[in-house]
Amino acid sequence: MGPSYPSGRDVLRDTVRGQRRNVALGSLLGSGHQIGEALVPVLIGIVIDQAVTDSDTGALFLWLTILAVVYVGLALSFRIGAWSGEKASVQAEHSLRITLVRRVLDPGGGAEEGRLPGAMANIATEDAKRVGAVNLALMFGISALMGLLTCAVVLLRTSVLLGLVVLLGTPVLLWLGHLLSKPLESRSEAEQERAAHASAVAADLVAGLRILKGIGGESTAIARYRTTSRDSLQATLRAARAQAFQNGMVLALTGCLIAVVALVGGRLAAQGSISLGELVSAVGLALFLLGPLETLAWVNAEFAQGRASAARIAEVLATPHSVTSGGQSLPQQVRGAVRLSGLSHGGLREVDLDIAPGELLGVVATDPAHAADLLRCLSRQTDPEAGTVELDGVSLRDLDPAQMRTALLVAEHDADLFEGTVRDNVTAAAPDSHDAEPAMTAAGVAQVAQTLPDGEDTAVSERGRSLSGGQRQRVALARALAADRPVLVVHDPTTAVDTVTEARIATGLREIRKGRTTVLVTTSPALLAVTDRVVLLDDGRITDTAPHTDLVRRHEAYRAAVLS
């Protein structure tokens, strides 16, 4: 969409441009409706002058028939035109949501930085909806302007003075309406910011509900959300007051313009400059003006809200990527050799490590933050501050992140499950021809399935909340194993399972990953016992590398991390 770093104006322009056919069709038919509405008082004036005044029954029947045809035409025009405008609005909203999701899921990352999931959801729903609605507002705005133009032309033909009142008064009214929309635009942006923050806090609290109950933090959480919700309410009320003030002022100014048209028309009729029918037409057109002018006031409000929401969407789309795509490609057959050279990032300091193809390596970090830093570099959520990470001799910086992740998978400790069945979750990332049964057996999912009502076909709720912590971990581990990547990095996959199950998983994991590179970032003795060797990461540096039993004997820091 648009340039690499779009502005709110770019978002609005591309939103309209993408739906130009529907907007054009809706504007054409909407204009036909408004022109027909403007002609109704004119036809009534003609009926009075040519049929009622002269008592001509034939002329009365003829003009009433014409009037009926006009009514049918304007009704059909409005119906089809409004449908076309709504279609443009909904399709634009959908397109924006897809664009936002594509940006959030971009392998280069970055869009989610500094934003809670609830805030992103609000932008992808409410803000996208408001920007999409600009298409509908534009269609109605063009239609209203055509109605005003028709009204002005008819009044000019009736009286130059009446036409000039409309032609000169309408731009002034539109300009004042635009000025009045400025406070609404700024307050609408604040309203959406507060609403997004409230949604984010609510989602955050729901996600951690079990933990909050466990530590007795419900009252603190409620107080936090109450404060956030109150701020959102105040912002919404300020925006509502701004919109009510704008609507009221525009309505008052519109009434003044209509009163002036009626007054001038009445004086011209009294002077004999226009006929009785023309006076009725002029008054009818003055009343007709209320509709288009109210529409334009609504359009101004929609544009103000659309501009504010477009700026928020543009901010997400313009967020720089966390990592960039390189120009090199991986070998056709990935061996799985991983090398860390002088790696420094966060708490890590000059880490040098060679992982041989097919090796099962354990990594014990005495500080969990250092383990997280290592995982971020291996998964290329970020590039290290210094040093390099290489896969088969190619620096990860030089690879496309998406291609890199087809060869190197980092399975996070807190990986979420998705709605669907247990089997659907396990096979989500598996190659089409890959048999998922060995992965399910190795991770202990077969035992989990035996306790579920429908076995592997049991439905899993959002984020796997219908399963216990241990069941979720085993399904997530099976999913990582079923992906069958040449290099697999797993972070604490068994913290919620019992020791017997953990021992079985350790054995199964070693068996299923035989011949492929596997890194276990964990402090679990059962898992570390099946590794070829273990790296001790203490104070951000590698202090020793040896089999698990040797490190237990040599290092107090290792024993404290693994056996405590």
Image (tube, rainbow, N blue to C red):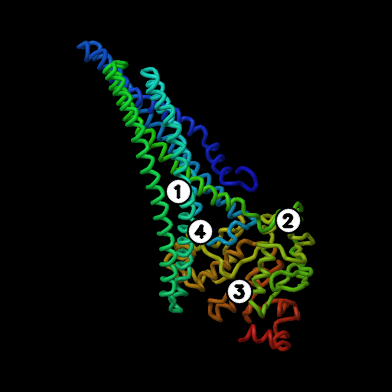
Indicate which label's residue lies in the foreground, 2 or 3: 2
Residue 271: x %, y % from top left: 29, 17
Residue 446: x %, y % from top left: 52, 69
Indicate which label's residue lies in the foreground, 3 or 4: 4
Determine the residue positioned at 30% across, 22% down: 267
Residue 556: x %, y % from top left: 69, 88
Callouts 4 and 2 close, C-beta under 8 Å: no
Distance in Å between CA atoms under marks 1 and 3: 50 Å
Query: Which comes sooner in the sequence, label 3 or label 4?
Result: 4
Pick the front one: 254 or 71: 254
**Going by the image, does 365 lie left or right of 86?**
right
Q: Amino acid at mark 1?
A: Leu
Residue on which the image places disc 3:
492
Residue on which the image places disc 1:
184
* Residue 125 appears in the picture as rendered: no
Q: Amino acid at mark 4?
A: Ala
Query: Which comes sooner in the sequence, label 2 or label 3?
Result: 2
Query: Which comes sooner in the sequence, label 4 or label 1?
Result: 4
Query: Which comes sooner in the sequence, label 2 or label 1?
Result: 1
Distance in Å between CA atoms under marks 3 and 4: 29 Å
Distance in Å between CA atoms under marks 2 and 1: 46 Å
Residue on which the image places disc 4:
119
Local SS, label 3: loop
* Residue 404 appears in the picture as rendered: yes
Q: Which mark is residue 399?
A: 2
Pick the front one: 353 or 541: 541
Pick the front one: 530 or 167: 167
Callouts 4 and 1 close, C-beta under 8 Å: no
